Amino acid sequence: MRAGRVAGTHTESGSGTRLPPVDVAELVRVRTHRPEAIAEAAARRVRRPLLGTSGRLMIVAADHPARGALGVGDRALAMANRADLLQRLRLALSRPGVDGVLATADVLDDLLLLGALDHKVVLGSMNRGGLQGARFELDDRFTGHRPEDIQRLGFDAGKLLLRIDYTDPGSLTTLESAARVIDDMAARRLPVFVEPFITSRTPRAGWSTTCPPKPSPGPSPSPPASAAPRPTPG
């Protein structure tokens, strides 16, 4: 087996071919016996321009598990099975119109070894310290990819999550650290995708992401009973 091509549940790809199953044991073997294979696979990866002719990107986001956000709909552990997650990502990346993937280092390392990132846009997830449900959730430390990691591995961009609660001091810490990371990425001429949300903690549901009300040209209207829900932040 050559590094960067670990065999991986047979599923039909976008080209009609069947993908081999993800062999987690083989991934573990390569990681333990040849950790340098990840850097080698990154160096061999065939890159593409960040934007195509449409000027748009379709990116599959898979960085949620790193902060303990494993649920999808009513399935609390939908993203908990690593082999299943990797297989679904490989299948998604094989589909026409999917430009790339956003994930943390552990997932991107595996996708590199599986040879799934050629001709794809790769975004490294940068701040994953705000564990879902933790009291310190909005003090979202940069525990993921650093700017130098993204540059060294030849990835295309970084992504940071910026959740702001006007009553939580942790939001200020995240704002300041996010600004410094954006500066660092700019100095390296690397793009960074910022995912901003206004959020607040609710007694039953934990953090609830909402849209701020739109400004009105006339007298301020009464605040709505409940703000419109937004997608679950990454």
Image (cartoon, helix red, strand yellow):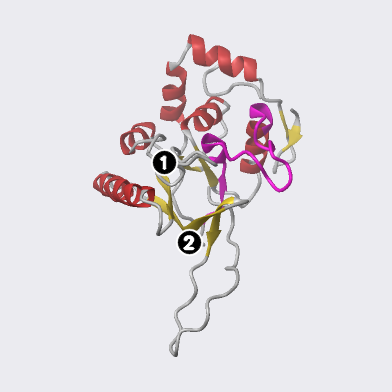
Q: Nearer the viewer, residue 122 or 103?
A: 103
Quarter location, residue 80? top right
Q: Tell me which amino acid carries mark 2.
A: Gly
Q: Residue at x 43, y 37 (%)?
A: 129
Q: Which residues are magenta?
A: 57-84
Task: Residue at the far bottom: name it.
Answer: 218
Which is the main secondary structure of the residues drawn in magenta?
loop
Q: Whole-percent x and y of residue 145?
A: 39, 35
Q: Is residue 68 magenta?
A: yes
Q: Whole-percent x and y of residue 176?
A: 29, 49
Q: Residue at x 53, y 76 (%)?
A: 223
Q: Whole-percent x and y of residue 213?
A: 50, 73
Query: Which residue does the numbered mark 2 point to in the structure image?
Result: 55
Badge 1 crowding class, 10 Å Cα cut-off, few under 14, some 14 to 19, many 20 or more, is many
Q: 150 left or right of 108?
A: left
Task: Residue at the far front: name it.
Answer: 203
Q: Whole-percent x and y of residue 93?
A: 61, 42
Element under disc 1: loop
Q: Residue at x 55, y 30 (%)?
A: 111
Q: Tell me which amino acid carries mark 1.
A: Asn
Cβ–Cβ under 8 Å for marks 2 and 1: no
Query: Which residue does the numbered mark 1 point to in the structure image?
Result: 127
Q: Residue at x 66, y 42 (%)?
A: 71
Number of numbered discs visible in the structure rendering? 2
Badge 2 crowding class, 10 Å Cα cut-off, few under 14, some 14 to 19, many 20 or more, is few
Q: 90 left or right of 183?
A: right
